[in-house]
């Protein structure tokens, strides 16, 4: 889709270069050959926990209504703050069981 207009502007160039990956849990529902060849999460080593990523994206999308009329700078600042606060809340419920070692 993005490849048809990949040279329109910087955003479309970035979008065309972005690899689309389907969540491992939902990949079995993607039966189209294009999806199997281009969106397979099992073909990317070290991808990480895609279910956890999907939960984060779903949580962040809950803020789309309050951010609709924000300019780019304000949106980035609000996104940074809410993700930082959520991370702090998560860390308070899940204390680290490992210690960093000095190198």
Image: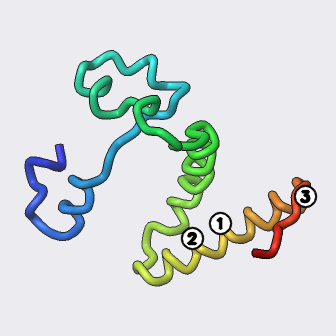
Q: Residues within 10 Å of mark 2 (few under 14, many from 20)?
A: some
Q: Nearer the viewer, residue 8 or 91?
A: 91
Residue occupied by mark 1: 83
Could you tell me residue 14's position as x and y percent? 25, 62
Q: Which mark is residue 95?
A: 3
Residue occupied by mark 2: 79
* Secondary structure of residue under mark 1: helix
Could you tell me residue 3's position as x and y percent? 13, 48
Quadrant (top left, top right, bottom left, bottom right) of the C terminus: bottom right
Is residue 74 shown left or right of residue 96? left
- Say if 79 sits above or below 94 in the image: below
Quadrant (top left, top right, bottom left, bottom right) of the N terminus: top left
Is residue 101 shown left or right of residue 52? right
* Secondary structure of residue under mark 3: loop
Q: For marks 3 and 1, give the one nearer the viewer.
A: 3
What residue is shown at x 59% (from left), y 74% (from top)?
80
- Say if 62 sits above or below 68 in the image: above
* Secondary structure of residue under mark 2: helix
């Amino acid at each position: 889709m993005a490849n048809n207009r990949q040279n329109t502007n910087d955003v479309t160039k970035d979008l065309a270069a972005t690899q689309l990956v389907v969540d491992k849990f939902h990949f079995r529902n993607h039966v189209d050959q294009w999806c199997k060849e281009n969106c397979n999460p099992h073909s990317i080593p070290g991808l990480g926990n895609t279910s956890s990523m999907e939960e984060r994206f779903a949580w962040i999308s809950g803020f789309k209504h309050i951010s609709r009329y924000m300019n780019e700078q304000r949106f980035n600042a609000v996104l940074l703050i809410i993700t930082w606060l959520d991370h702090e809340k998560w860390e308070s419920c899940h204390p680290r069981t490992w210690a960093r070692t000095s190198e």
